[in-house]
């Protein structure tokens, strides 16, 4: 399943998050100026070594950088007035504008989602294969109907799954 989960627009590109990868698109004016004519960059979560994230504030731009090789990681320099040319040219970095207030909230959500996905893939838990609480509950209902568990065991599991 490759339906887009989240989208975050930066000044030099757009990050799209999917279940198993991210895509960095440079289809913005600044993205074109910084990167030239390049296609989308697709990075699978299992290939990401780390995510470097600096939340934009009213005082300074932020960034979201995907580190796929530790030797290639660079410290991004961003500020309210400008951003270093190295940060703009890094193919794995999207600069987050300090001007738009909602960018901080949206970028935090994007970072949290990506870190969760990376963690899931690193620990062998494919997020697409993880059952929802409803699926889990249906499995336990079947066990109850089959007589494999008691009503009290089912009720306890139901409370746990529903967070009651």
Image (cartoon, rainbow, N blue to C red):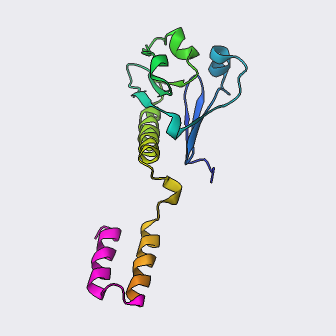
Q: Quadrant of the C terminus?
A: bottom left
Vertical placement of 153 versus 77: above or below? Answer: below
- In the image, 107 versus 87, the foreground residue is 87
Res. 60 image quadrant: top left
Residue nearest the viewer, comparing 143 with 11: 143
Q: Is 42 rendered above or below residue 81? A: below
Q: Is residue 148 magenta?
A: yes
Q: Position of residue 80 (x, y in %)?
A: 43, 15
Q: Specify start and end residues of the magenta stretch as a single range.
A: 146-164
Nearer-the-camera pick, 43 or 106: 43
* Helix, strand or loop for the magenta stretch, by majority: helix
| The N terminus sits in image quarter | bottom right
Query: Which quadrant holds residue 43?
Result: top right
Q: Which residue is at 44% across, 77% downward?
A: 139
Q: Is residue 137 magenta?
A: no
Q: Is residue 32 left or right of residue 135?
A: right
Residue 159 spot, x, y in % from top left: 29, 74
């Amino acid at each position: 399943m490759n339906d887009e989960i989240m989208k975050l627009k930066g000044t030099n590109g757009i990050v799209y998050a999917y279940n198993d990868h991210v895509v960095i698109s440079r289809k913005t004016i600044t993205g074109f100026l910084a990167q030239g004519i390049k296609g989308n960059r697709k990075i699978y979560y299992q290939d990401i070594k780390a995510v470097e994230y600096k939340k934009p504030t009213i005082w300074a731009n932020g960034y979201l950088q995907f580190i796929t090789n530790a030797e290639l990681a660079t410290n991004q320099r961003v500020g309210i007035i400008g951003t270093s040319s190295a940060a703009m040219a890094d193919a794995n970095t999207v600069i987050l504008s300090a001007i738009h207030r909602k960018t901080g909230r949206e970028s935090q959500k994007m970072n949290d989602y990506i870190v969760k996905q990376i963690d899931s893939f690193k620990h062998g838990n494919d997020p697409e294969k993880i059952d929802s609480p409803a699926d889990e509950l249906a499995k336990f209902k079947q066990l109850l109907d089959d007589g494999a568990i008691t009503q009290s065991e089912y009720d306890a599991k139901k409370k746990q799954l529903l967070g009651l």
